[in-house]
Image (cartoon, helix red, strand yellow):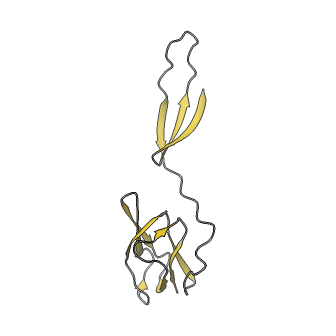
Amino acid sequence: MKNYTITVNGNVYDVVVEEGASSGAPAAAPKAAPKAAPKAAPAAAPKASAGAGSVKVEAGAAGKVFKIEASVGQAVKKGDAVVIIEAMKMEIPVVAPQDGTVASIDCAVGDPCEAGACLATLN
């Protein structure tokens, strides 16, 4: 038996393939069990121009900035959406990691972003 990890359209599958008999009979169909896709690794470093706040609000996935939910000076609570990115036709909220005030918005609607990119900062 051999084990393989295969990614198809972003879905990761662990596949076990049994070697068939040498009689020419077809081998048993491979068994595939889907598992959660691995999280994208963060970008090497956020933009050098990342804003004025000490707390970074970073993208969890690569995509395109779809909507900016908060504005500079607005108070936000932990879990509030600050920016929404679009990836593979899904809208993904980028949320405040803690309570604070939005110090800067470092992106614009339509901008591409990488996973781990700093999209806003909080104080």
The one nearer the camera, 45 or 110, is: 110
Identified at 49% across, 78% down, the residue is 98
Residue 105: x and y in percent read 47, 82
Viewer-side residue, 96 vs 70? 70
Q: Residue at x 53, y 65 (%)?
A: 115
Q: Residue at x 53, y 34 (%)?
A: 15
Could you tell me how many numbered marks the image carries?
Answer: 0
* Residue drawn where x is 63% and y is 67% of the image: 44
Residue ranking furthest to the right: 44
User: Looking at the figure, which quarter contains the N terminus?
Assistant: top right
Residue 79 appears in which quarter of the rendering? Answer: bottom left
x, y percent for residue 91: 37, 64
Q: Residue furthest bottom?
A: 73
Asked if 109 appears above or below 90 in the picture, the reply is: below
Q: Position of residue 52 (x, y in %)?
A: 55, 87
Up/down of 83 relative to 43, above or below: below
Left or right of 16, for residue 84: left
Q: Position of residue 45 (x, y in %)?
A: 62, 71
